[in-house]
């Protein structure tokens, strides 16, 4: 019996992606551990090209048995780049082609999640992906295909779970994505509605009442049309002073521990100069935040509403199913999304205050470098979430204060 081959579900931006190679502003070969899987390691040992084989051998380190990766490339001590990167180009790819890249290198910046079909997406830490996702209105339209061109890709397998739970997680994601695409509500309002949805379904879901969650999802679809409270943005709390203080103070409290990416550092310098443009007391910075938001940020973002919408849709599409299968609490997923969104806006407002303008290039640079700096582990957002919990804002109302 022949098994049916799974289809690939692919957003438009992935079909347009081509690595920019030597022209890349923030190459993926820098300051990371470039890991090598065993089969690629063995392939390198048998390479017919002797000079290249010797060069690879000199730059490869076999990792200890308890490490997750079989081997890795040394980093160049002067540049911080992978030792195989020459003149901005990977010398393995240049000499013997992409079939010789390790799984880590061929897969990045792609993310492939296995499910009923294979869901393809990518990380916005890659500058070219960030441009494609954020600057095109139709970036998050999807098509299906039977094959992908790139060889040796890593496909993430979900944690095993019952079919009812799987169906429930997919049902939740489908409704979240429907809400995120519903432009009758502002994006902030859509995020709060998602908070209401996840807050109300978390208890049922985590107690295993998956059928009840599915029934609730149908009811919630109806509520989106008929429930005047849910549809009324004004009833959700807002306070710009609390918003600025909580976001700015938590960011400053953790910055020195987490900051490493040079491009993000440039954005942060602009943010800091911007927020101190009219003085550095709380009332002066708050005045700057309020005026830069109203006069520069809001007009730009209203005109390009799809930018942050695409960011959020890509995040949910890429992470919701795997995170919830891995045991993340539904409300925590929402809270981290709300913090992420609010932080991106905070940075952009500070940068806009500094330059007295906001443009696409600034948005792409900030979101790309913010993603690269913070999002290869969950540590930063978890630390921020803990602070926010301690300050008493870990609730739907508290998240509304950050989002609005
Ligand atoms: S970050 Fe993206 S564009 Fe830059 S070198 Fe890596 S894959 Fe290519």
Image (cartoon, rainbow, N blue to C red):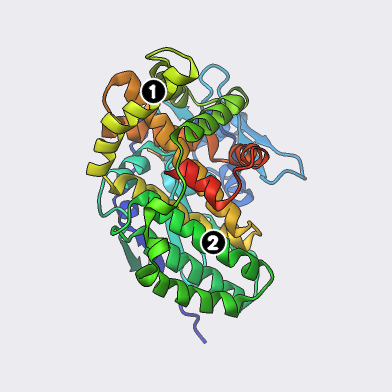
**Ligand 1 position by quadrant:** top left
Q: Quadrant of the C terminus?
A: top left
The reply to whether residue 11 is in sight is: yes
Closest to the observer: 117 or 330?
A: 330
Give the residue at x 26% y 55%.
Answer: 138
In the rendered image, residue 208, in percent from the top left (x then y), is placed at 67, 73
Foreground: 35 or 307?
307
Q: Which residue is mark 2?
A: 198
Query: Disc 2, disc 1: CB below 8 Å?
Result: no
Residue 329, picture quadrant = bottom right
Residue 184 percent location from the top left of the image: 28, 59
Foreground pick, 171 / 90: 171
x 43%, y 67%: residue: 175
Density class for disc 2 (Cα within 10 Å; few <14, some 14-19, many ≥20) is many
Q: Nearer the viewer, mark 2 or mark 1?
A: 1
Q: Which mark is residue 287?
A: 1
């Amino acid at each position: 019996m022949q098994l049916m081959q799974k289809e690939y579900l692919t957003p438009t931006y992935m079909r347009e992606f081509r690595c920019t190679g030597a022209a890349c502003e923030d190459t993926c070969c820098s300051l990371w551990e470039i890991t090598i899987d065993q089969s690629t390691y063995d392939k390198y040992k048998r390479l017919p090209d002797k000079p290249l084989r010797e060069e690879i051998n000199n730059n490869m380190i076999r990792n200890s048995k308890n490490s997750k990766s079989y081997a890795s490339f040394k980093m160049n001590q002067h540049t911080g780049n992978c030792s195989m990167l020459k003149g901005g180009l990977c010398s393995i790819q240049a000499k013997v082609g992409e079939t010789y890249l390790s799984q880590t290198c061929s897969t990045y910046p792609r993310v492939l999640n296995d499910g009923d079909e294979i869901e393809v997406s990518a990380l916005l830490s890659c500058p070219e992906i960030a441009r494609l996702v954020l600057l095109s209105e139709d970036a998050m339209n999807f098509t299906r295909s039977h094959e992908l061109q790139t060889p040796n890709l890593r496909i993430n397998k979900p944690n095993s779970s019952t079919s009812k739970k799987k169906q429930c997680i997919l049902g939740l994601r489908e409704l979240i994505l429907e809400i995120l695409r519903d432009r009758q509500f502002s994006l902030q309002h859509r995020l709060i509605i998602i908070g209401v949805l996840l807050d109300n379904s978390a208890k049922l879901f985590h107690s295993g009442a998956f059928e009840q969650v599915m029934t609730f999802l149908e009811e919630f679809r109806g509520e989106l049309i008929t429930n005047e409270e849910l549809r009324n943005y004004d009833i959700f709390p807002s306070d710009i002073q609390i918003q600025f203080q909580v976001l700015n103070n938590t960011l400053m409290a953790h910055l020195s521990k987490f900051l490493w990416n040079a491009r993000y550092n440039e954005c942060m310098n602009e943010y800091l100069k911007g927020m101190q443009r009219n003085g550095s007391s709380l009332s002066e910075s708050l005045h700057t935040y309020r005026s830069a938001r109203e006069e520069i940020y809001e007009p730009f973002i209203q005109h390009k509403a799809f930018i942050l919408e695409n960011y959020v849709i890509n995040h949910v599409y890429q992470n919701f199913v795997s995170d919830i299968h891995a045991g993340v609490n539904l409300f925590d997923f929402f809270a981290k999304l709300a913090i992420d969104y609010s932080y991106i806006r905070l940075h952009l407002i500070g940068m806009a205050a500094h330059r007295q303008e906001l443009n696409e290039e600034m948005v792409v640079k900030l979101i790309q470098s913010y993603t690269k700096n913070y999002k290869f582990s969950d540590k930063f957002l978890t630390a921020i979430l803990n602070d926010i919990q301690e300050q008493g804002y870990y609730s739907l109302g508290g998240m509304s204060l950050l989002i609005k």
